[in-house]
Structure formats: C-alpha cells, structure tokens
Image (cartoon, rainbow, N blue to C red):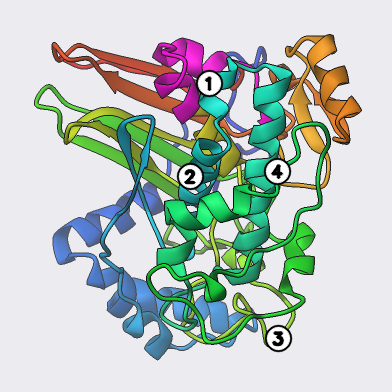
Amino acid sequence: VFLDEAGNPPVSPEQASPARLRQPDLAQTLETIAAEGPRAFYEGALAAVMVAHLADSGAPVVAADFAAYEARVVEPLAVRYAGHEVVTVGGGTGGTTLAQSLLLMDALGVGALGHNTPEALHRLAQAFRKAFADRFAWLADPEFVEVPLTVLTDAAYAAERAAGFQADRLGPVAAGSPDRVGVGHGLGGSMPGYAAAAANGGQMADGSTTHLSVIDKDGLAVSLTQTLLSGWGSRVTVPGTGILLNNGMMWFDPEPGRPNSVAGGKTPLSNMAPALLLRDGNVIASIGSSGGRRIMNCHAQLVANLLDHGLGAGEALAAPRIDASTPELLASVRLPEATRRALAALGHRVAPRDERLFTGDFASPCAVLRAGDGTLTGAADPFYFPASAVGMV
C-alpha cells in the first residue's frame, strides 16, 4: 500500500521532496464516509470488512463493538495563566496534565524569573514532575473511574502542591492527595502505589500523530490532534480500505486494579493536549504538537514563551526546551552549558539532547497567533522537516 514495486517508500533519491503516493482504497473509503456519513465506518460495509479482518487476525473484536462506539462531545477545560484563559481538553487526556502544570507554574512564580534561566527551569521541572505524578496516580477515563478533575485543576490545590518546593535542591516528588483537599469534589479514598507506575506510562514520541492549528479571518479557531500512536500504528492495514489500525491499547496500564487498567469500552489515558489561548474571550493563539508524553511539557513552555515572555510564533516554537516527563531531565543542547550545569548542581539528572536531530526527545509543535488587528502569524517546528505553516487568502 505504501511502497513502490521495488519495496521502497515514494521519496526522491535526495529525500528532499515526496513523490505522489496514490491510495485508491483510502480514497474510496473517504468517498463512502462522505456519502453515507460517519456511522458507515462503525455499522456499514466498512465496519464489516474491518471486523472480518480483525477476526481473521485473531482479535476478539465483534460487530457490536464497532456499532457501540460514539464520539464524545465534552465541555472544554479552561484555566487562567498570566491573565489569559488557556482552553484545552479535560478528562483522561494530556489537557488535564497541561492545565495542572500551568497552575503549578503560576504557584511557583515561574514567569517572573526570566526566560530559560536556571531558576525558572528548576521550577518548571518541579511543576512538570508533580503534574505527572498526579497524572499517573489519578487520571483515567472518567466514564469508568471517578477522577478528581475539579481539584487537580484548581489553583488552591496547585498552591498546596507547590508549598514544599525547595529552591536550592530537587525535592522528592510524589502524587498529591486531591481526595483530601477541600476544593470541589474528590475521591472517596486514595489509590496507593499507583504513582510508582509513572515511569511506565505513555509513549516517548508518537510516530503517527498529526496536529493541525487553524485560525480564520474572523477569529474562528481550531486546535486538532489525531494519532495512530506509534509509527504506522499497529502496522496493519485493512485490505481494500487503506485504513491503518492504531495500537492505542498500549496507552492502558497493564496492571489490573488501577485507574487506567484495561476494560471493555474504556478509553485509555492519552497524551494529546490541543489548546487555544484566549484574551478577554477572544482567541489569540492555537497551539498543539505531536510527541507522545512530551506534548504536555512542550505546550506548557509554549504558553510561557508566548504569555510570560512575549515571544512571537516562530521564536516561541524554536526556543530550546526541557522535558521532565521521565526520570531524566532532558535539556536542549542549545541551552547554555552553564544553565545545564546549574540544574545538575540542584540535583537534576540532566541529559543533553539535540532536537535538531529529531530523535523524538522533544515534541514537535505548531502554532497560529492572532494579533489585536486580526493579523495572523503561523509557525511550525523548525527542526522537523514534515512540519509546515501555510497562509491562505
């Protein structure tokens, strides 16, 4: 489906520009959905073909599973940061972790410490680690598990989590106890031991994730992320349809009895965190990225770059970043060596990484900004050649 007759991908010898990739099966699939509506994918002939192929492959999926699927339309999650509203997705997504990270950054006073200074980065890393500890301890599909979303995304809880911050060293990081905070609603009891699974959660860098940010002349905005998870998803294409199947099952926690454990009909905890930035109710930016668990740290730093430091779209995306979603603190080699040494002296296990090699160590973002006069500016990751920004009149 994706290779030429010689078994090679359709690119030029110089790898500079792609050749035309014809996908007639996928074109017919899209024509069918356009003519019959989205339910054709879940209940029509397309569903029958996919169910048959999955059955032939040994998967325990039946037609009723496809027919029962419904996309969820939910209220967005909004938090305040630097006098603006950041709107993202909630529930068992990266949006909840992004929102909590921003509240922790605000509680730790990150914005007042300068751009990418050791002091600011130290606090950023601590904010990210605390948000991730709570992520793996508490987040899951809210249709199956009671999740303390109101508390996790409340400024009072962030202030409590930030209270133990140590400016002169890297302190211990553990999940908080939102079930014991008098904000909104919480859980009836804690879930001990789940924070230990943090190191096992999530994909390092989604290989088949695409993000699209759009703002039109009237200020209508979209921030859209979709993914197959790993590169080429499950690497299975349903014959005759052009449809690649995802491998999103790996987003679940394999251990039973935990919030994100596997269950029929359950949606796994995902990394995606598309976001819009609003000033006085008007959209000023649409941001998003691919990059697995790196997405959330990336977006928090983009928000800080735009709102705390006044960077433009291109500058905000190109600025060197850190990532604290794993035990090591990944730090761009473009950060000054003195900054990286200062972080190491504070106790961080600093691991220099060169995002220009696109090794998947950092997310790959894009953004569209809208100025007060309606001028639109777009930018894409300068270190990832498939990323692009386009203006249309």
Could one spot residue 287 in this view of the protein? yes
Q: In the drawing, what numbered circle is on residue 112?
A: 1
Q: Nearer the viewer, mark 1 or mark 2?
A: 1
Tag 2, which secondary structure?
helix
> Answer yes or no: do the residues labelled 3 and 4 have beta carbons within 8 Å?
no
Q: Using the image as rendered, state which of residue 89 and residue 266 is in the foreground.
A: 89
Q: Which residue is mark 4?
A: 165
Q: Cα distance, mark 3 to mark 4? A: 33 Å
Q: Earlier in the sequence, mark 1 or mark 3?
A: 1
Which span of residues is magenta-colored? 303-322
Q: In the drawing, what numbered circle is on residue 157?
A: none
- In the rendered structure, does residue 9 fall within the stretch colored magenta? no
Tag 4, which secondary structure?
loop
Q: Earlier in the sequence, mark 2 or mark 3?
A: 2
Residue at coordinates 63% horizontally, 43% vertically from top-left?
A: 127
Tag 3, which secondary structure?
loop
Percent from the top left, x then y, of residue 24? 38, 47
Q: Is residue 377 left or right of residue 219?
A: right
Residue 52, above or below 103: below
Look at label 2 and name its amino acid. Answer: Leu
Q: Earlier in the sequence, mark 1 or mark 2?
A: 2
Q: Cα distance, mark 4 to mark 1? A: 16 Å
Q: Cα distance, mark 2 to mark 3? A: 31 Å
Look at label 3 and name its amino acid. Answer: Pro
Q: In the drawing, what numbered circle is on residue 256?
A: 3
Tag 1, which secondary structure?
helix
Q: Cα distance, mark 1 to mark 2? A: 14 Å
- In the rendered structure, does residue 310 fall within the stretch colored magenta? yes
Q: Nearer the viewer, mark 2 or mark 3?
A: 2
Q: In the drawing, what numbered circle is on residue 103?
A: 2
Residue found farthest to the left: 218
Q: Earlier in the sequence, mark 4 or mark 1?
A: 1
